[in-house]
Image (cartoon, coloured by chain):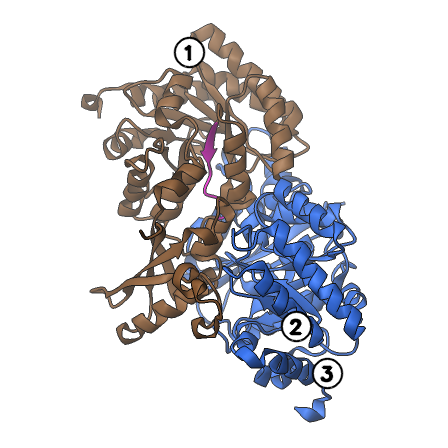
Chain colours: A brown, B blue
Amino acid sequence: MSVPRIDAVYRLHVPAAQAGHRARLLAVEQSIEMPPEAVGDGRVPDEVLARVDDVATQPDGTSLARLQLACETVGEDAGQLMNMLFGNCSLQPDVELVDVEVPALLASAFGGPNLGIDGLRRLTAASGRPLTCTALKPIGSTVSQLVELCRVFAQSGIDVIKDDHGWANQRSAPFEERVPACQQAVRKADGATGRRTLYAPSLYGTQVQMQRQIELARSRGVAAFLIAPLVCGVATFNALRREHPDLAFIAHPALGGNRIAPPVLLGKLLRLFGADAVIFPNHGGRFTYPAETCQAIARGNRAAWHGLRPSLPVPAGGMSVERVPELKREYGADSMLLIGGSLLAAGERLAERSRAFVEAVAAGEAAA
Amino acid sequence: MSVPRIDAVYRLHVPAAQAGHRARLLAVEQSIEMPPEAVGDGRVPDEVLARVDDVATQPDGTSLARLQLACETVGEDAGQLMNMLFGNCSLQPDVELVDVEVPALLASAFGGPNLGIDGLRRLTAASGRPLTCTALKPIGSTVSQLVELCRVFAQSGIDVIKDDHGWANQRSAPFEERVPACQQAVRKADGATGRRTLYAPSLYGTQVQMQRQIELARSRGVAAFLIAPLVCGVATFNALRREHPDLAFIAHPALGGNRIAPPVLLGKLLRLFGADAVIFPNHGGRFTYPAETCQAIARGNRAAWHGLRPSLPVPAGGMSVERVPELKREYGADSMLLIGGSLLAAGERLAERSRAFVEAVAAGEAAA
């Protein structure tokens, strides 16, 4: 019986006649990193060397190479999966990683989202519609300014208020002051409205620092966190998710621009490592992903996959209240719409604009 | 008195007429992430918003935008420096980061290499010539196969034997078995030759896992480690360097392919965060960096910079004994030459080939 392998599909930007050779070099690069004929131990070429399963030239002249990587090269380490999938070839501009499939055992080892879409709905009591999300901006604000934003956003009925991803431990609002104060402001507003708003502080630094941040925040009732897995390392992210199975993690794509196709990195890998929600730059905003890429990310987040919980796709990056009907049509109810700066630009009319966001999301399709 | 800022130079791939506007958008993206005119607190646009210092169109039609980022957005967190320099704009394909300068205080906070070039020379007793380095390959080998490689390499007089960067905790040679056995083999050979060879095991996983790996290895006398900062996260890397000021860290560039120019990422940032030696893909090997890029990396590793120790540049990736004279001329004595697979390809003549490597590096320029 053959041992299951990791399937990885790479796009090779080389002339078609060279694609087979390039694929074999890639298989060596992403596994044993030495000439297979020079390996003394016969087990290694058979069981450890990546295999070239298929190479197919495409109409655009590039070729798709399907490689099979041995699971034993990865173990259960998320960082090592990234390393074997794309560590060295990230330095080779003729290669893109365009799809990944992992065996069920590996999916189960990484575990996927703790709570997933259903869990986030339970935490926020939001059903049958997209969740609403906004961000505490700008960095440089004081704690009292952020508390006031929390009050207004929570009173307006926004489901999730996250720290802007630039928040770490800045002196204008250090984590230890900011997080308890914002959480308290949200709870207080919830008490008045009867709603449930989640406050998600941004984690920064190393695993040990993040553990301390989580413990502090958890002691105040915080149940969700923002994390940038490509900044902190996916192994750190996956470890936190395993150690805190009752918490939700919202993944931010910062530093995620490389030649791993966004539907793979943001659609699949971040879900695999534990993202309950995945923020991605939606088309038509400040970023340039095409619509098909964005839709493929959302499909990856939600598709049936080895029994992993689905992640909530979060189209973001320059969205506005005016685009809510379009976003609802495009991403459906199982999504979270994130509007940040565009709400804050309303200035004194922030509460009104925030309520308009909540109402636009709650409205039936007819209102679109 | 103005507060020192972080200087970051970005190449903008936009029409020249749009470059000024694009630079201002980038300054917002990489700092406050909201319209400056909508910020209520006047301190934030003055002190926190990134400033556009200069925008200059280049002969190739791109523009170079010099931005000044506020240090208060970063604190002393290496991950946060990456986030503010390139977190969001890594997702915008029209932007590259092509230079970075940090204030002396920030350089001192991150601290740079623990030992640097002089320290690595002391550890290996190698003076007046490049250091020699090879790698334990392939992953999938058994501990006894790796021990035999260590014996041959150390007896041949190679200065540094590192784990291949694909080594984590694979079952064919788990870290806890591999590292003590390889270290012992190297020490034993050293005892016979009177030389000093450094064995550098590969760290994997999270900060907590790496701490355990370091403690285990250190108890056996290991003094140098291989680490992939872009895989584990630069904050984890910098924290380990701070916690273990007597250890050397050899940085591997895996997952480092993005739109941060290699002379910035590998030449400067990895040094800033603590790389005593920086492995980079040399031109003419399996990777495609041009020669000027490689030389700029080496310059960044060694240039005078806020009193930080210099890092040892390590040209690698498909190098061979035949290229040693050329590599010596190009990179000079303050470098480390890494030859991996090409030695192993010698099969039964591994010892002979390894000695040839050592002798070629030791030979005077006349031998070239």
Q: Which chain contains the residue that carries disc 1?
A: A
**Alpha carbon separation for disc pair 2 and 1:** 67 Å
Image coordinates for residue A274, horizontal then vertical, percent: 44, 35
Image coordinates for residue A10, horizontal then vertical, percent: 34, 59
* Circles 2 and 1 in contact, beta carbons < 8 Å: no
Q: Earlier in the sequence, mark 3 or mark 2?
A: 2
Q: Residues within 10 Å of mark 1 (few under 14, many from 20)?
A: some
* Residue that label 3 marks: B362
* Residue that label 1 marks: A195
* Residue that label 2 marks: B153
The amino acid type found where label 3 is placed reads: Ala
The amino acid type found where label 2 is placed reads: Phe
**Alpha carbon separation for disc pair 3 and 1:** 74 Å
Image coordinates for residue B298, horizontal then vertical, percent: 64, 70
Is residue A343 positioned above or below A292 on the image? above
Picture quadrant of residue A183: top right
Judge whether residue A254 is colored magenta: yes
Picture quadrant of residue A176: top right
